[in-house]
């Protein structure tokens, strides 16, 4: 068998990136000229600063906010990790699964997709798999004989949401777990999910492995070497062929765990990553690869719905959900927020209330982007033969493919938005044109008081921007003009979005 060693793959990747880095340093990131310089194009296109995201990662960044749904055997046992010995009919919804309600509520709350636990650590497959009998296909309860990914992916497609899948590598039911046989089964399960349920935007491969389990009746502890056992390089190759646009979560692929389950990324947050010595929450400023973080958080007291979940105090308030949004999406991370259906196959009333409450807060905060009707001007603009190519006005044109840029070597500058009249400003939302790398290291927010600029205090550090950064002013300010001062940047900054609320 082709049991690649993940470490060797990683070394190869690192070498490749180092070569790219060497090439990158030969291009004029700080004003010097070079033979590789943009073929002297009069369009004056800025060079990227490496590493940069792939097309797949760019699409993933745009997902920003989506739901997790843990639903399976554990929903009916009050457990978070099933042992693998649960009988198939333990999965016994008391009513037909209302996937229309799941998707409607998630969509109305502003989320762009749903990642479903198709198989958790207990090994129970919630689709009609050919790989094991431990599946809903053999369920004989009134409402349990369901192919949930089929139902949910179809409903997501109908309502315009993306669909994703969580398939646990650790399988406490499978008798072959820990041996070669299971690796083939596991890959086949992934192939089924990649083949039969339309386009996937994300696949989650959790790293948990607690050792003990049922394992077909053996009831023992089995440990594996996670780096080699699953032969992930070959599985990932298959996923790339079957689902080229699907982001793989974990295992150092397209995106990664932020490092906590509370839904926060660092106030300084780089999508570039080396070894996480600073903690995954922060990324690494000089990281050699693009590996952005995803914040995962639950709205209740467990990942699965349980009988105490809806009790007072167990579920996050709408305000807490909003705060999580701010510390994740607001800090250059994606947010996957868990809303588990209950035994009746619906999102509970408390969950729905949370979702709607969150949306009310979201709309109150970000309903009107004042910058869209404002006028942007900058201290300087990069020259180009294409008129307006790097103009200040690109930051508020609602087009993420256009951006304001400075000349090579300029790592600071100012851009202001004239709002036309006095408005109350509380939040500023910024975005870099990350297709050419993450650059900004420091910025400030100033407002016009009628005669001079006043630097505003913010509730969070104003260091990195990345794909998205949302900054809240410590106190809302009445002003007719807002200025973003870029104080430091790796190389010339490229800003594609400024929104003011
Ligand atoms: C963890 C799992 O062990 C939890 O049960 C849950 O699925 C969470 C999202 O990932 O590692």
Image (cartoon, rainbow, N blue to C red):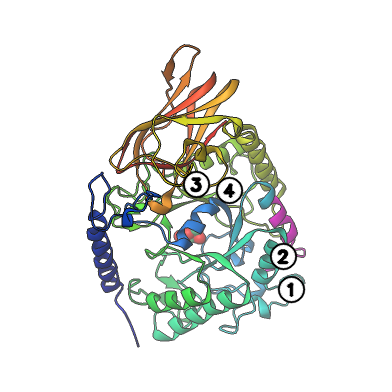
Q: Which of marks 3 and 2 is in front?
A: 3
- The numbered disc on residue 300 is 4
Q: How many labels does the image show?
A: 4
Picture quadrant where residue 79 is located: bottom right
N-terminal label among 2 and 4 = 2
For disc 3, does the CB lie below 8 Å from ligand 1?
Answer: no
N-terminal label among 1 and 4 = 1
- The numbered disc on residue 93 is 2
Residue carrying label 1: 141
The span picked out in magenta is 91-105
N-terminal label among 3 and 2 = 2
Out of 115 and 449, give the one closest to the viewer.
Answer: 449
Instruction: Name the residue at 67% across, 71% down.
Output: 150
Q: Position of residue 405 (x, y in %)?
A: 40, 41
Q: Is residue 227 magenta?
A: no
Q: Could you give the CA–CA distance between mark 1 and mark 4, rounded to whole angstroms?
A: 27 Å
Q: At numbered mark 3, what does the secondary structure look like: helix, strand or loop?
A: loop
Q: How crowded is mark 1: few (under 14 residues within 10 Å), some or many (20 or more)?
A: some
């Amino acid at each position: 068998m082709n049991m690649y060693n993940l470490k060797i793959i990683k070394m190869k990747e690192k070498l490749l990136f180092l070569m790219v880095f060497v090439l990158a340093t030969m291009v004029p990131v700080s004003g010097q000229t070079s033979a590789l310089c943009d073929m002297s194009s009069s369009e004056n296109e800025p060079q990227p600063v490496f590493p940069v995201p792939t097309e797949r990662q760019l699409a993933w960044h745009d997902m920003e906010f989506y739901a997790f749904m843990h639903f399976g055997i554990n929903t009916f046992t009050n457990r978070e990790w099933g042992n693998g010995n649960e009988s198939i009919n333990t999965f016994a919804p008391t009513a037909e699964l209302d996937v229309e309600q799941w998707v409607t509520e998630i969509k109305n709350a502003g989320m762009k997709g749903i990642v479903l636990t198709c198989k958790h650590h207990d090994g129970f497959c919630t689709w009609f798999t050919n790989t094991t009998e431990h599946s809903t296909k053999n369920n004989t309860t009134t409402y349990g004989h369901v192919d949930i990914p089929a139902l949910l992916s179809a409903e997501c497609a109908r309502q315009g949401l993306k669909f994703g899948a969580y398939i646990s590598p650790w399988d406490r039911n499978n008798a072959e777990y820990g041996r070669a046989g299971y690796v083939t089964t596991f890959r086949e399960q992934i192939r089924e999910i990649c083949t039969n349920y339309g386009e996937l935007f994300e696949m989650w491969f959790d790293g948990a492995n607690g050792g003990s389990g049922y394992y077909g009746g053996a009831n023992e502890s089995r440990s594996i070497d996670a780096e080699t056992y699953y032969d992930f390089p070959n599985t990932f190759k298959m996923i790339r062929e079957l689902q080229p646009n699907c982001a793989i979560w974990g295992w150092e692929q397209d995106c990664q765990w932020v490092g906590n389950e509370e839904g926060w990324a660092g106030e300084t947050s780089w999508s570039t990553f080396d070894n996480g010595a600073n903690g995954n929450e922060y990324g690494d400023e000089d990281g050699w690869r693009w590996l952005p973080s995803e914040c995962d958080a639950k709205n209740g007291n467990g990942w699965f719905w349980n009988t105490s979940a809806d009790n007072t105090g167990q579920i996050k308030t709408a305000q807490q959900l909003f705060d999580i949004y701010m510390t994740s999406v607001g800090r250059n991370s994606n947010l996957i927020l868990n809303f588990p259906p209950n035994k009746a196959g619906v999102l509970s009333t408390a969950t729905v209330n949370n979702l709607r409450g969150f949306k009310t807060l979201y709309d109150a905060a970000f309903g009107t982007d004042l910058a869209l009707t404002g006028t942007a001007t900058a201290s300087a603009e990069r020259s180009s033969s294409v008129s307006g190519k790097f103009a200040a006005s690109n930051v508020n044109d609602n087009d993420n493919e256009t951006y304001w840029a400075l000349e090579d070597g300029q790592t600071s500058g100012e851009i202001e938005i004239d709002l036309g009249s006095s408005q109350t400003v509380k939040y500023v939302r910024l975005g870099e044109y990350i297709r050419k790398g993450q650059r900004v290291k420091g910025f400030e927010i100033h407002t016009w008081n009628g005669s001079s600029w006043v630097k505003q205090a913010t509730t969070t550090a104003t260091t990195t921007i990345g794909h998205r950064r949302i900054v809240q002013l410590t106190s809302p300010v009445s002003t007719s003009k807002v200025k973003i001062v870029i104080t430091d940047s790796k190389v010339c900054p490229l800003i594609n979005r400024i929104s003011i609320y």
